[in-house]
Image (cartoon, rainbow, N blue to C red):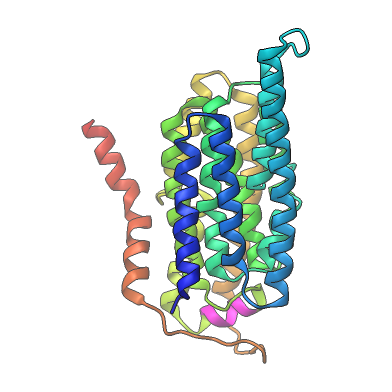
Amino acid sequence: MMKMYKLMFISMLMMSTFISISAYTWLGMWIGLEINLLSIIPIIQDNKMMSSESSIKYFITQAIASTIIMMSMIMMMWKFNFPSMLNSTSNLLMIMNSGLILKMGMAPLHFWFPEVLEGLNWNNCMLMLTWQKITPMMLIMYNIEFSIFYMMIIISSMIISGIMSINQISIRKLMAFSSINHMGWMMSSMIMEKTVWMLYFTIYSITTINITLMMKNIFYLNQLFPYLNMSTYMKMFFMLNFLSLSGIPPFLGFLPKWMVIQSMIENNMYLISMIMIMFTLVMIYVYMRIMMTSVIMKTNQMNWNLNLNLKINKMSISMLNFLSMTSLILMTIMLNMI
């Protein structure tokens, strides 16, 4: 049963997102971001040492990002009042977007993101991986343009997420680096077409929610394999969701990557699309290694501290997974009809 105060803060969290993305001024946007920060801290506090540490790390990082955004807003105000002092608005927007990139934990400003996720439970991880990305991404989408700065951000996200996910034993950190990889794809989709970003984020959120709902008390790979061996049902859905998250056809996760690659090739961006595909293949290798190990390795060795709870709502997980697996066919039919 969710505590009443957490329900209140979740409603404030949602309201703050709508305030930010519908704000008429940069100051209104900043106010929404601050309400968001003050709402998420009590939600992720769980009366445990790890969650308290994560909430402090998150608060400090978000406060630094808010300071950068406020500084860029003040500098823009100086530019309009004293045009001779500052010559380029695009540089100021770049500073503001750097603060927003820090807020959502995209590389190379990702240093806090895996560490914060490591101390949270799966419900809070789901919130950090999905809802908390909406506001910064929407605000970046309002003023993003093709430049070397954004290309470097995208390439660094691909390289760092690919390399850091190798030999990773924590599932929460693996999901964090997977999120950084997908954010690189999302930023490239923003530059190309805004509607592709909306589709990409929706599909990524569905797949991530599926995976986090299945994890329960599983946080490390040595806990995952016995858990999957106890339930063939969960093993099948876990594998299918990881295939969808990696963007392999015929699963739903392939559709947005397909659309992004097509848009980039139409705009003659061959090199960066090749780099993105290459380092996404590294992520696919990591996913495939976990899946193959879970299929091949039949172990009964239990972790003494592992609390396996297989009382899951099979109907809700089945519906979500059916949506994730079959929607590529449905959406292809819809696109052909349009």
Whether residue 289 sits left or right of residue 267 in the image: it is right
Query: Relative to residue 301, is residue 330 depicted above or below?
Result: above
Query: In the visual, does 129 lie left or right of 69?
Result: left
Q: Measuring from the top left, give residue 52's x and y in whole percent.
A: 70, 70
Among the 4 quarters of the image, the one containing residue 82: top right
Of residues 15 and 89, the one drawn nearer to the viewer in this rendering: 15
Residue numbers of the magenta segment? 223-228
Residue 259 covered by magenta stretch: no
Which quadrant would the N terminus be assigned to in this image? bottom left
Q: Given the current orientation, which residue lies at the most extreme top position?
A: 84
Asked if residue 225 is among those painted magenta in the image, a careful observer would answer yes
Question: Considering only vertical position in the picture, is 281 above or below 173?
Answer: above
Residue 242 position in % (x across, y down): 51, 59
The residue shown at (43%, 49%) is 203
Expressed as whole percent of the image width and height from the top left, the position of residue 36 reads 56, 51
32 in relation to 80, above or below: below
Q: Main secondary structure of the magenta part?
A: helix
| Quadrant that contains the C terminus | top left
- The count of marks equals 0
The quadrant holding residue 312 is bottom left
